[in-house]
């Protein structure tokens, strides 16, 4: 029986299969990279706000504690946003005529809150409680980054599940003394692992990785 295909067909078939595998692998890698990119996660993207509030000025320059504005961070799931009256405590006296602060003054006159643009967004099916993390010794900086160096606020981390699990699996690498939770620029000790293990035991921190911990 005559040969239907030239001998080179075998090499061509192998090359085609190899090429398809490489192309599909490359596409998979690109999709994975895109999924974790800042464009998709929103990390390092500055959101336009009705007032150009600067954490760098207020926290880094003036030394205002996180809890002055985010009053419920130690007691509830939501850290809380400052009431207009909180802003006007200072700005009725300082920069009281600044055009950039007119939305704050308008809010104070009308009683209608300033409509801030949300920076950190979690899906509706993700449960997160600020008070639990704060009281277990997880610093604001660990999740939110050095806000004291942000002239405008952005999301520092991806907030993807893998990022959360890194801490939940090994909390001893991230936990800090409770008195340093609100401290920006805190440096872990050289023996962070030993200190972390001690704090994990002292604060009764559990390595919670079950789905229902966050997905409720």
Image (cartoon, helix red, strand yellow):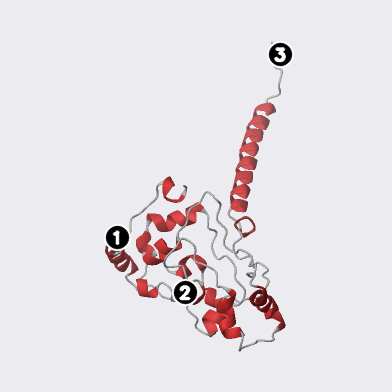
Neighbour tally class for label 1: few under 14, some 14-19, many 20 plus, Cα within 10 Å = few
Q: Can you give x and y, in whole percent of width and height, for residue 37 in the image?
A: 61, 57
Say the numbered circle drawn on residue 134: none
Residue 98 image-quadrant placement: bottom right
The mark nearer the N terminus, 3 or 1, is 3
Relative vertical location of residue 164 with respect to residue 196 in this rendering, above or below: above
Q: Residues within 10 Å of mark 2 (few under 14, many from 20)?
A: some
Identify the residue under disc 2. Answer: 67
Question: Which residue is depicted at the point 56% across and 73% down?
Answer: 83
Side of 53 relative to 135 (left or right): right
Between disc 2 and disc 1, the foreground one is 2
Q: Earlier in the sequence, mark 2 or mark 1?
A: 2
Residue at the limit of the structure toward the front, as seen here: 110
Callout 3 secondary element: loop
Viewer-proximal residue among 128 and 150? 128
Residue receiving disc 3: 2
Relative to 24, does residue 192 appear above or below in the rendering?
below
Where does residue 145 sit, x and y in percent of width and height? 51, 69
Query: Mark on residue 204?
Result: 1
Q: Look at discs 2 and 3 and give the one toward the viewer.
A: 2
Q: Secondary structure at mark 2?
A: helix
Where does residue 148 sit, x and y in percent of width and height? 53, 77
Q: Is the N terminus in the top left, top right, bottom left or bottom right quadrant?
A: top right
Is disc 2 in contact with disc 1, using a CB cutoff of under 8 Å?
no
Q: Residue at x 40, y 47 (%)?
A: 210
Taking the image as shown, residue 45 lies to the left or right of residue 146, namely right
């Amino acid at each position: 029986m005559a040969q239907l295909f030239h001998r080179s067909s075998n090499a061509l078939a192998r090359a085609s299969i190899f090429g398809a595998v490489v192309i599909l692998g490359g596409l998979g890698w690109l999709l994975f990279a895109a999924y974790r990119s800042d464009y998709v996660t929103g990390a390092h993207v500055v959101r336009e706000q009705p007032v150009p509030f600067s954490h760098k000025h207020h926290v880094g320059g003036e030394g205002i504690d996180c809890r002055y504005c985010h009053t419920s961070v130690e007691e509830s799931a939501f850290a809380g946003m400052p009431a207009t009256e909180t802003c006007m405590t200072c700005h009725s006296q300082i920069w009281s005529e600044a055009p950039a602060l007119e939305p704050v003054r308008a809010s104070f006159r009308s009683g209608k809150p300033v409509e801030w643009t949300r920076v950190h967004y979690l899906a509706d099916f993700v449960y997160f409680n600020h008070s639990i993390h704060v009281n277990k010794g997880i610093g604001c900086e660990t999740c939110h980054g050095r806000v004291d160096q942000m002239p405008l606020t952005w999301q520092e981390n991806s907030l993807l599940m893998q990022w959360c699990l890194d801490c939940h699996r090994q909390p001893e690498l991230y936990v800090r003394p409770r008195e340093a939770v609100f401290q920006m620029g805190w440096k872990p000790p050289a023996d962070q692992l030993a200190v972390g293990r001690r704090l994990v035991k002292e604060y009764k921190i559990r390595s919670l990785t079950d789905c229902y911990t966050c997905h409720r």
